[in-house]
Amino acid sequence: MRSYYVYILASKKNGTLYIGVTGGLMRRVELHKSGEVPGFTQRYGVNRLVHVEVFHDVYNAITREKRLKKWKRQWKIELIERDNPEWRDLYPELIR
């Protein structure tokens, strides 16, 4: 069964946030980190993976991404800090 991911990237703790959805989390985060994704994340240095949610249905993942993008900033911060209070980069844990 294929997995889809809704993820939040940050520039730093309490910094600029980016919310995305992908079917290939590792590759997508690698692209953000390398600066190969032109636009917002490249411009603002948003490349620290701080939150991930897994879905098995692409429509549920896209719906969740759209909802999160409409959330107030404080709600997004609280979501991140619930499971990742230090805002550590989760990417190294994924590549183990």
Image (tube, helix red, strand yellow):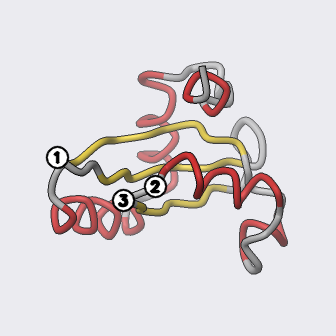
Quarter of the image that includes the C terminus: top right
Q: Pointer 1 and pointer 2: residues touching (CB < 8 Å)?
A: no
- The Cα–Cα distance between marks 1 and 3, rounded to whole angstroms, is 24 Å
- The Cα–Cα distance between marks 2 and 3, rounded to whole angstroms, is 19 Å
Which residue does the image show at 82% across and 64% down from the upper left?
Answer: 35
Q: Which residue is denoted by mark 1 in the rendering?
A: 1
Compared across the picture, whether 6 is left or right of 15 comes to: left
- The Cα–Cα distance between marks 1 and 2, rounded to whole angstroms, is 13 Å
For discs 2 and 3, the disc positioned in front in the rendered view: 2
Q: Earlier in the sequence, mark 1 or mark 3?
A: 1
- Residue 45 lies, with reference to residue 70, above or below; the image says above
Task: Please give the label number shown on residue 68.
Answer: 3
Task: Kindly identify the amino acid type of the residue bearing the numbered disc 1.
Answer: Met
Q: Residue 23 at x, y = what percent?
A: 38, 59
Q: Residue 59 at x, y = what percent?
A: 17, 68
Q: Which residue is denoted by mark 2 in the rendering?
A: 24
